[in-house]
Amino acid sequence: MNVATIPQSMDGHDVLTASFSASYAGVVAFIAVASEGSFARAADRLGIGRSAVSRSVQKLEGQLGARLFLRTTRSTSLTREGELFYESCRPGVERILQALEEMRDLREGPPRGQLRVSATHGFGRKVIAPLLNGFRKSFPEVSVELVLDDRPLDLAGDRIDVAFRDGALEDSQVIAKQLVPMQMLVCASPGYARRHGLPGSVEDLQSHAFINQRLANGRVQSWDFRVDGRQRSVQLSAELVFNDPDLVLQAVLDGHGLAQLPAYQVCDALRSGALVTCLDSFAPDDRGHYLCYLSRRQQPKRIRAFIDHMTAQVRALDLDVVSQWEAARANAARGERIDQAA
C-alpha cells in the first residue's frame, strides 16, 4: 500500500501536526457558514453555539491572514478570498464526511440518516408522497424530506440525494433511471364532451376551450402530438392557466375545457368515468418518468435502499392506462374477426 508523504512547512515542521487542532474546526465552521449563508444557521447545523462558530472562523482567518466573509447585520457573504478557499476546501471536507458516514453505515448495520428527495409537484403528490410511509416502515431509521419543485434539477447545489423528474435529462453527470412511461393524454369531462363534442384531429382543437399549465421557467406548457410519424408541438391560447397541475386537473373535472395531462395524474378519473380522452392516436412519444441521482459509487445504504424500494413500488402501481386500452382494443378487434369468420 502506498502512503502519501505528509508535506513539511518551510521551517521543517510537519504541516498536518502543526495545523490540525487549530485549523480543522475552523474549516468545518467555515464550510457550514458558507453553505448555510448564516452563522446562526451554521451553528444550528453543527449543534454548537453561534459564538463558537464565530471564534473558529476568526481563528482560521487569522491563520490564513485573509478575511473570508463580509458580515453585516442583515447578511453574510463570501469575500473573493473566501470563494477561492471554499472551492478548494469543500471537496476535501465532503470526502471526509462521506468516509465517516460510510464507515458508520458499514459498522452499525441497517440504513440510517437523512434523505433529501425532490419531485415535481404533480408526480410528487400523486405518486411519491403516498409511498413514503411504506419506505419508513421498512427503514425506520431513515428520515425523509420531500421537496416539491418543478425547476431544472441541481442535485449538488440543492443538496438532493434522489430526484424524480419527467423526461430524460441532458446532464451527463446525473444517473437517470426510467421508472414508468410518461403518457400524455388529452382529457375532458363527460359534461364538456356532451356540450361541445371532442376533437377528432389536432386541427379541430382550435374550436375548443383549453386549460394550460405555466411551468417553473415561466413558459406555458405546449401540447405535444405525433402526427404522420413526426413530433408536433402546439401552443394553444387557454381560457384558464394555472401553475399547479392539480388545479389544471380540477378545472378539467369541472368541465371548463380540455387539457393535456400525464396518465399517472388522470388514471383514476379515467377508470371511474370522471374523465374521457380524445386524440389518443396522436399521443406523443413516451418521455418517461425518471429517478435521478449523482453517482453509484460509495452510495450510503439509505440512498441505495430508497432507490431500490421506490423503483419496485412505483413500477407496481397501476398507472399505464394506455397499454390497457390498446390491449382491450386488440382483443375486441380479434373477437370481431372471429365473429365475422364464423
Image (cartoon, rainbow, N blue to C red):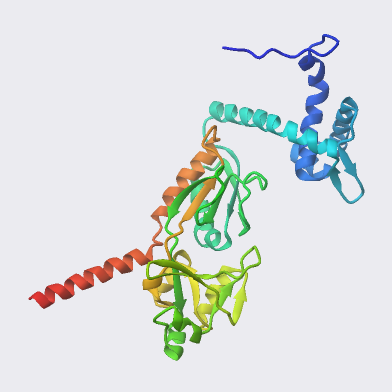
Residue plotted at (88% across, 36% down): 51
Residue at the farthest left position:
342
Is residue 49 something that shows in the picture?
Answer: no
**Picture layout, residue 206 above or below residue 10:** below
- Determine whether, in the image, residue 333 is placed left or right of residue 59: left
Residue plotted at (42% across, 49% down): 312
Is residue 176 something that shows in the picture?
Answer: yes
| Residue 34 picture location, percent across and down | 78, 41
Residue plotted at (49% across, 41% down): 305
| Residue 286 picture location, percent across and down | 42, 60
- Determine whether, in the image, residue 211 is placed left or right of residue 94: left
Viewer-side residue, 124 vs 287: 287
- Determine whether, in the image, residue 196 is placed left or right of residue 21: left
**Picture layout, residue 186 above or below residue 170:** below
Viewer-side residue, 220 vs 1: 220
Viewer-side residue, 173 vs 76: 173
| Residue 195 picture location, percent across and down | 45, 91
Question: The N terminus lies in which quarter of the figure?
Answer: top right
